[in-house]
Image (cartoon, rainbow, N blue to C red):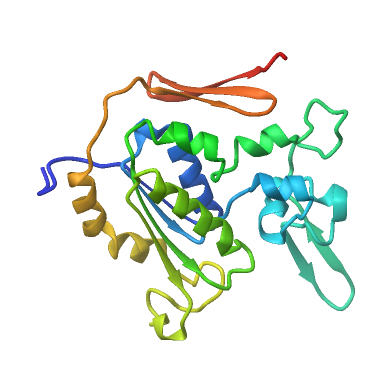
Amino acid sequence: MSKWGGLATIYVGSSHGGYIANLCAKYAPWTVDAVLDNCGWNLSTEIFDKKDYQLGTFRTIGFGKEIDFTKYRRDSRDNENFHLCVSDKTYWTSNSQSPNYFSRSRYEIRDLNETSHLLIQAQYSKPIFKCYHVKGDIVAPIDEKIKFYDQLNALGFDATLDIVSDKSRIDGKFIKDLNHGMGMSMKLLVANNYEWLMDKIAQNKKLKHEPNIKFKTSQYLYEFNEQNNQVNLKCSKITQ
């Protein structure tokens, strides 16, 4: 038994992993005590509405190649003879006639900043949130993260956003540069925040509630629940 009185569940991730860690806290808030995130991004519904696809986030969906396979690629390899563009394999498509159309509703359930969903999350036990994010991040624009943390704090979450903007923060060990991810190792990310997070968790009030949560979007109702140590999803189309 530790000085904190027991075990804790902390979701940790960098870049896309940071985004997934935050999604886990959204879909199953009863399973998590804290989220530790380094430059995680967000699939904002505003991007879908404006069709203002930002390179860092939209390319992760996989079907960006249908729009522009050079711009919305996952990665590329170049030499003097060819330019190879690589995309993720996906069942999603931008074809609105397909059952796999990545519609606005399917954006909404993946949007960490969806206000109506955050209001529902706030009715559950509130995990501790901590994030390091570089100010000039061109992969995961910081405006989305600032909006997310502003909403978390307004709803009573203990949420700390450390915006790294000055070269003086570069120590060559923990923060190595001011690019996306900052060259930060997962090991040091955890080591530098472990005791601080565990102290916060020990003081955090846990609520008793059923292991299920529901989110309504413009087209579907998403129901997440836990049975036999497994989180399951039921997706139902909303009838008008």
- From the viewer's side, name the closer residue of 240 and 89: 240
The quarter of the rendered structure image containing the C terminus is top right
Q: Residue at x 51, y 67 (%)?
A: 181
| Residue at x-position 72% and y-position 58% | 54
Residue displayed at 52% across by 35% down: 117
- Residue sticking out furthest to the top: 239
- Position of 34 relative to 53 (above/below): above
Q: Quadrant of the N terminus?
A: top left
Q: Is residue 40 above or below residue 90?
A: below
Q: Nearer the viewer, residue 67 or 81?
A: 67
Q: Is residue 97 left or right of residue 5?
A: right
> Can you see residue 181?
yes
Expressed as whole percent of the image width and height from the top left, the position of residue 204 reads: 22, 43
Note whether 56 is above or below 203 in the view shown: below
User: Which residue sits at x=38%, y=24%?
Assistant: 229
Task: Give the percent coordinates (x, y) of residue 82.
Answer: 88, 70
Q: Position of residue 83 (x, y in %)?
A: 85, 68
* Location of residue 163 by image quarter: bottom left
Tell me if I can see residue 40 in this picture: no
Residue at the bottom extreme, as displayed: 168
Quarter location, residue 212: top left
The spot of residue 84 in percent (x, y) is: 82, 63
Q: Quadrant of residue 230?
A: top left
Q: Is residue 13 left or right of residue 47?
A: left
Q: Farthest residue in the front direction?
A: 154
Q: Closest to the observer: 23 or 156? A: 156
